[in-house]
Image (cartoon, rainbow, N blue to C red):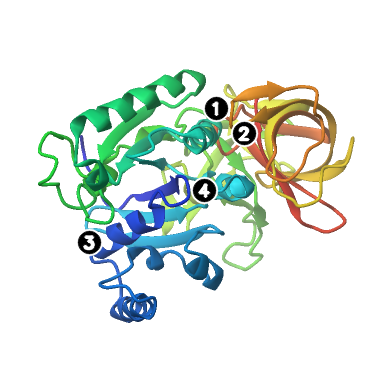
Amino acid sequence: MSIENNQLLRISTAGSVDDGKSTLIGRLLYDSKSIFEDQLEAIETTTKRKGREGIDLALFTDGLRDEREQGITIDVAYRYFTTPKRKFIIADTPGHIQYTRNMVTGASTANVAIILVDARNGVIEQTRRHSYIASLLQIPHVIVCVNKMDLVDWKEDRFLDIQQQYEGILSKMSIKDVRYIPISALEGDNVVNRSENMSWYQGAPLLHTLETLHISSDLNKIDARFPVQTIIRPQTDEFHDYRGYAGRLESGILRKGDEVVALPSGFNSRIKSIDTFDGTLEEAFAPMSITITLEDDIDISRGDMIVRKNNQPNQVQEFDAMICWLNSSAARPRGKYTIRHTTNEQKSMIRDVVYKMDINSLERNSEDTEIKTNDICRIKLKTTKPLMIDEYRDNRATGSFILIDDGTNETVAAGMIIS
């Protein structure tokens, strides 16, 4: 397996309260020497003030005063660190059910989810909930870290029992790649360095697994989707007739000379050039930010999408989606909201609530149609103009959206398109 040098890996962590998420991240940062001296001194001071010895690793991520005082994680804490092999962004998300929306936020862009399981408790309700959210968000890789192995005498039988428990809940999920690692975040076993206490475990420690995880194939390289963000018209003597369409290539590959179509107008053209800050390219691939010029002068504006002529998204005004309600105010019956999909904004209306998901039991409830904070529901949505969409399972970029309340300008929901 090749190491994808300098690639950015986005990690989401999840687990029940006191499963040791913050301690695990602290251990990763500490043992990989990714902490500044002044940070280390501040944490040592706080640890002493609490009357403890050594370093409380959890304090590296529990940055908010309330969290430090309660010893829990409330908001999503992001930490960045780099090893010679890869760059990492870790989202430390809270474990409580009332912070489901925070986990959805933290996990929405993740390549891998680390789900912590307490070796003493095994798979519990929150493990199922966090795994369901990882499955719902189509996170390609899940690493189940069985933590606190030091408290069960490093027993292999206990680790294998929890692995079997977790395999039992996977039948209701759609997770492609699951790995299991027995660890002790507090002691550092199998986090950065291999454990001497668990010689029966032949796999790699957590950091090595993260450094060598193959993520290039997780991107959709087939469906070229280029939502136009802005039009570039320098109007200088040197670039008098230049008209470029700038944005981020969300998926697929585009090459100079490709036959493309601009949606929703349906006008055809060919790619004349692919320009970047560093010069022109023969081809571009996701997720590069580029400027495209076309051989024909056609009317394209922000929110339009440039795609291959023979591979187009669906243009629809009505579709089904799973949403997580983020706002403290409940959704209004047949409420109207602005939908933001890629670079496109339209007015939309929640036509119907098909069912609500009980993410503890993984059962569907079609009787209760009131959408409140942290609820995950399947809805029918109608927009004023067609959107260029793909299903979320095929394309996370063009299959996702947010809903915005026009009155408050708050983001009220995050959605994943089903059909």
The answer to whether residue 4 is visible is no
Whether residue 293 sits left or right of residue 21 in the image: it is right
Q: Is residue 390 above or below residue 16?
A: above
Where on the picture, by quarter, is residue 319?
top right
Q: Are the residues at dot 4 and dot 1 in contact (C-beta closer than 8 Å)? A: no
- Give the number of the disc on residue 393: 1
- Give the number of the disc on residue 131: none
Q: Nearer the viewer, mark 2 or mark 4?
A: 4
Q: Give the residue number, with chain letter if any, for mark 3.
A: 31
Quarter in which the C terminus is drawn: top right
Q: Where residue 220 sits: x, y (%)?
A: 47, 32
Q: Is residue 258 above or below residue 286?
A: above
| Residue type at the position of mark 4 | Gly
Give the distance between the C-alpha atoms of the residues marked 2 and 4, in whole angstroms.
26 Å
Label 1: few (<14), some (14–19) or many (≥20) C-alpha neighbours in 10 Å: some
Q: Give the residue number, with chain letter if any, for mark 4.
A: 95
Label 4: few (<14), some (14–19) or many (≥20) C-alpha neighbours in 10 Å: many
Secondary structure under tag 1 reads loop
Where on the picture, by quarter, is residue 152?
top left
Q: Nearer the viewer, mark 1 or mark 3?
A: 3
| Residue type at the position of mark 3 | Asp
Q: Give the residue number, with chain letter if any, for mark 2.
A: 399
Secondary structure under tag 4 reads loop
Q: Are the residues at dot 2 and dot 3 in contact (C-beta closer than 8 Å)? A: no
Label 3: few (<14), some (14–19) or many (≥20) C-alpha neighbours in 10 Å: some
Q: Nearer the viewer, mark 4 or mark 1?
A: 4
Q: Are the residues at dot 2 and dot 1 in contact (C-beta closer than 8 Å)? A: yes
| Residue type at the position of mark 1 | Arg
Look at 42% across and 64% down and name the residue there.
61
| Residue type at the position of mark 2 | Gly
Secondary structure under tag 3 reads helix
Q: How many marks?
A: 4
